[in-house]
Amino acid sequence: MGRKSQSKQNQKKSTGKENNKLYLQKRKELAFLVDRVLRLTSIFQATGNVSKSWEHHLEIEKLVNEITNIEGTQLRNTRTLRQTHIDKYLQWLRENGVQFDGIEIAEFKGYDLGLKASKDFTEGSLILTIPSKVMITEKNAKESELSAFIAVDPLLQNMPNITLALFLLLENNNPDSFWKPYIEVLPEKYSTILYYTSEELELLKPSPVFESSLKLYRSIARQYAYFYKKIHTLDIPVLKKLQEVFTFDSYRWAVSTVMTRQNNIRLSEADVTAFIPLWDMCNHEHGEIRTDYNNELNRGECYALRDFKTDEQIFIFYGARPNADLFLHNGFVYPNNQHDSISVTLGISSGDPLREIKMSLLTKLGLGCVAHYSLFKRQNPIGPELLAFIRIFNMNQEELTKWSSQSLPSDLVSSEPSSAEAVGADIDRRAHTYLLTRCKLLLAAYKKNDNENRTETDHVTNVKLLKQCEVQILEATVTYLEETIRTLPTAVKQ
């Protein structure tokens, strides 16, 4: 018996040593990979070279995949379905003063969870009131044990959204968290680009959102590597807790939660970033912002943006944002987006003999030699900045000299008849023809990339919808430009 007992003890010791050795080996591998991610994401990437940005992304993604393989995909908690926690969540809301009479949480096709009216609401009527005590704000983070880390980290001091993400990770791992019922009904993962495969991301080409997505992914990968090193090297008590929960998978979950749910509210005479329970389950619809913070009652208030009938889903308006922004930061596309636009990058070549005088004229108008301009989803898709650029870009030496002599050539940014007359039909014909050619080239690129057949996932569907919206804007712009050119007065021959 004694020998067997001794044998078992030796076996346990041996296993313990082997486990510890394996743990240290994994830590060493992770540290090496994290260093490589940090170096790679610190490399400056000039915008415009999409091919190099893509190669760079694939290198980063490969390292991140190796990291997640070592760390493993950690479930945020033991639950399996958000729905199983809804009753407890609603009880918590009621106990803490949230008023939502006539409101239910329900599933909606294409939306996952949302809010449903269980009675009729008229436009402008009060739907929800949410006391500040149930909100999770950056102020809560600064008053928590995380404050010691915030005090020494410049990134956290300047980026409240990241502070909120780290605080969420801590609270998610705290069984006694006041906000546990809220956190338990958060999604397990999101439809942000942080969850896209490289194949799904590549489908974004030639959309300008493709490069924006790579930039966002690179930024989050860099943040992960930056905080990993800090968490495992600084001697601050709270970081010991973060060591237990901080992985790439958990960080992208926390960051995605912030991106899709954060709101800025005026709290105690200061703007703060916050999660607003229940209200953040409302999905988006075109309309007006009908939510506000009541400082006297210390609560958020949500009013109906239109009439809602019983059993109808209740929507709110997320603000005048293009689909590119909604896709990147909220993970969805809104087809009927009246505030939609597409970004077009235009610039003056370094080889242009008139570059200096063109740049000087652009500078007078507060524009640069290379910039992102927007084509809008509206009757006149060309904004004043873009109009000024295409006019200046297509001027000859004599025209540039004439306009440069003016202290503020404001007519260049206006499409009003008097300004158009001052600019002249000849310049406008060249300017609009130039933009027409660019738009047609962009449309051809979209059609070239539309031939690929991919397995239809939610991500792929979102990408296709985004590109369809962008193509519609380009096609409408082409029609507008062709009509504008057609109606320009012809030059009178002497």
Image (spheres, helix red, strand yellow):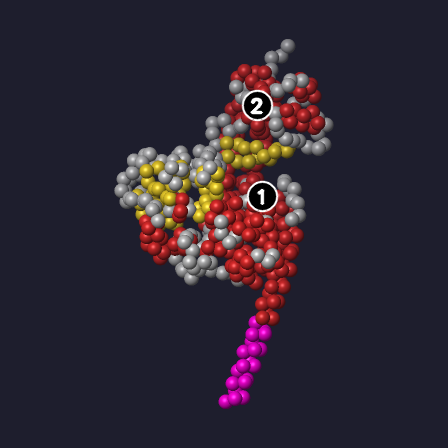
**Front one among 181 and 444:** 181
- Residue 257's x, y, as percent? 47, 49
483 to 90, vertically: above or below: above
In percent of the image, x 53 and y 82: which residue is there?
8
Residue 413 is tagged as 2
Note whether 436 is above or below 332 in the view shown.
Answer: above
Disc on the earlier residue, 2 or 1: 1
Image position, residue 432 (x, y; %): 58, 25
Residue 277 x/y as whole percent: 39, 47
Is residue 182 found left or right of 170 in the rendered image? left
Residue on which disc 1 sits: 211
Q: Is residue 179 found left or right of 54 in the rendered image?
A: left
Callout 2 amino acid: Val
Magenta-drawn segment: 1-19
Q: Mark 1 is on which residue type?
A: Glu
**How dense is the environment of label 2, judged by Cα within 10 Å: few (below 14), some, or many (20 and up)?**
some
Front-most of residues 313 and 180: 180
Residue under the point 46% across and 46% down: 137
The mark found on residue 199 in the picture is none
Task: Name the residue nearer the viewer: 485 or 326.
Answer: 326
Find out whether the residues at labels 2 and 1 contact each other: C-beta distance under 8 Å: no
